[in-house]
Amino acid sequence: MRLVNKHSEWMVFLIGLILMASMNPYEQGTTWCLLEHIGLPFCPGEGLGHSIAFFARGELIKSFEAHLVGPFVVVGLICRILFIWKNLYQQTTMDLKEKNYV
């Protein structure tokens, strides 16, 4: 169980980025916004998935048009994933040194 806890955050972020980047941003589908499902007309994350998909395809202008913070979210999540990986690597290295494996 400890292994799952260590890796769950970066795996969720990476899978989410991959799924959003691989979707077709030109198709309109149903929304996942809970605010729209309860009847409110505005959703603060509207277009974020499309923005990430456009960003993954290198269409930066369309990415900003879909959602202003979309490219920043991608960069932020990638930085967070790399930060977690770095910490896991350092922790594993320290654990190995304590057990005299290195």
Image (cartoon, rainbow, N blue to C red):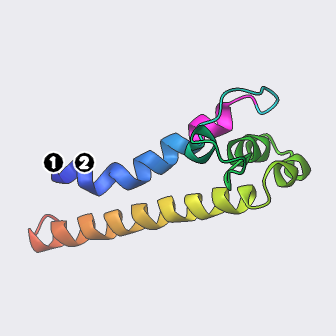
Q: Position of residue 51 (x, y in %)?
A: 76, 47
Q: Is residue 102 above or below residue 65?
A: below
Q: Amino acid at mark 1?
A: Met
Does the magenta segment cover residue 64? no
Say left or right for 7 vs 54. left
The reply to whether discs 2 and 1 touch (Cβ–Cβ < 8 Å) is: yes
Quadrant where the image shows the C terminus: bottom left
Say left or right for 21 vs 98. right
Q: Which residues are magenta?
A: 18-24
Which residue shows up at 86% across the image and 51% down it? Answer: 60
Pointer 2 residue: 4
> Which class describes the residues within 10 Å of circle 1: few (<14), some (14-19), or many (20+)?
few
Pointer 1 residue: 1
Q: Position of residue 1 (x, y in %)?
A: 15, 48
> Which class describes the residues within 10 Å of circle 2: few (<14), some (14-19), or many (20+)?
few
What secondary structure is the magenta-colored segment mainly?
A: helix
Q: Is residue 65 above or below residue 86?
A: above
